[in-house]
Structures are given as C-alpha cells and as structure tokens.
C-alpha cells in the first residue's frame, strides 16, 4: 500500500490532555484527561481517548513527552474517528491546523531527537 502521509510518524505513547475548541456539541467544555498519543508527526497525530470526538472538531492538544517531560501545545482538527470499544475507547486522526510554527518546530525537534536516540 502506498504511503499517503506527508511526514513520517513516530510511534510513541505520550500523555495527552484535550480541550474542545470548536465544531462539536455535547462535548465537555473542560479539559479531557486520560488520553494518549499512539503516534505523532509534524503534521498530526493518532490519539486514543475515552470521548467520541466527531470529525471536524477543533481541539487543543497538550502533549507531555515521557522521555523529556516536555509539554507541547498544538491545535488540530479531527479527520477520522474509529470506535475501539463502544462508549469506552476511541482512536482519532488529528491534523495540526493553526498551530504556531514554534510548536511545530518543537514537535519536529523532539521527533528528530527521539529518532537519533533510538539509533544509538
């Protein structure tokens, strides 16, 4: 199968806090905790959550890297959603949109650092 992604993804589970910014009704207004990333790139992330996040929802994502304990905040739009366990667990593809270039650079730097440390 041909790879359609613009940027390579790094498989890594990181703690994630989600805040819904726009585009969805009946979702919590406060931060949603107990989520994590499955993989991440400079253009987006695959996340796992206990909350169903409809396609088109705009999210603020606060990642906390396990390895360097660095917090990175990015804005993203849900592009797809998959039910893992009904009413318990969901997986979503999030494309970063409107994220400041400094945050994208931090994500890219982190991925580069992590890939180099894995090669050693």
Image: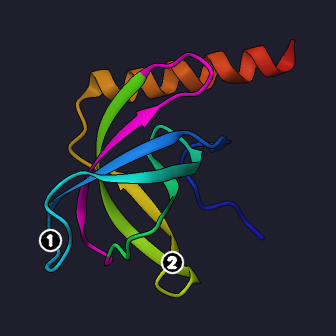
Disc 1 is placed on an element classified as loop
Identify the colour scheme used: rainbow
Can you say which quadrant of the picture contains the N terminus?
A: bottom right
Q: Position of residue 42 (x, y in %)?
A: 47, 37
- The foreground one among 86 and 6 is 86
The residue that mark 2 highlights is: 88
Can you say which quadrant of the picture contains the C terminus?
A: top right
Q: Position of residue 27 (x, y in %)?
A: 20, 72
Q: Where is residue 70 in the image (x, y as percent from the top left)?
A: 45, 19
Q: Which residue is drawn at 76% across and 15% down?
A: 117
Q: Which of marks 1 and 2 is in front?
A: 2
Q: Which residue is drawn at 24% across and 68% down?
A: 57
Q: Where is residue 19 in the image (x, y as percent from the top left)?
A: 23, 52
First reached walking from the N terminus: tag 1 or tag 2: 1
Callout 2: few (<14), some (14-19), or many (20+) C-alpha neighbours within 10 Å? few
The residue that mark 1 highlights is: 23
Q: Which residue is drawn at 32% across and 26% down?
A: 103
Instruction: Locate residue 8 relative to residue 46 in the image: left or right.
Output: right
């Amino acid at each position: 199968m041909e790879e359609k992604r613009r940027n390579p993804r790094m498989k890594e589970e990181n703690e994630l806090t989600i805040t819904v910014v726009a585009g969805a009704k009946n979702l919590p207004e406060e931060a949603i905790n107990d989520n994590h990333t499955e993989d991440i790139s400079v253009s987006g992330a695959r996340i796992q959550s206990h909350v169903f996040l409809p396609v088109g929802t705009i999210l603020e994502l606060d990642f906390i890297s396990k390895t360097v304990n660095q917090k990175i905040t990015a804005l993203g739009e849900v592009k797809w959603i998959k039910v893992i366990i009904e009413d318990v667990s969901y997986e979503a593809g999030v494309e970063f949109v409107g994220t400041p270039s400094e945050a994208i650079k931090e994500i890219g730097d982190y991925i580069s650092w992590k890939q180099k440390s894995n090669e050693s």
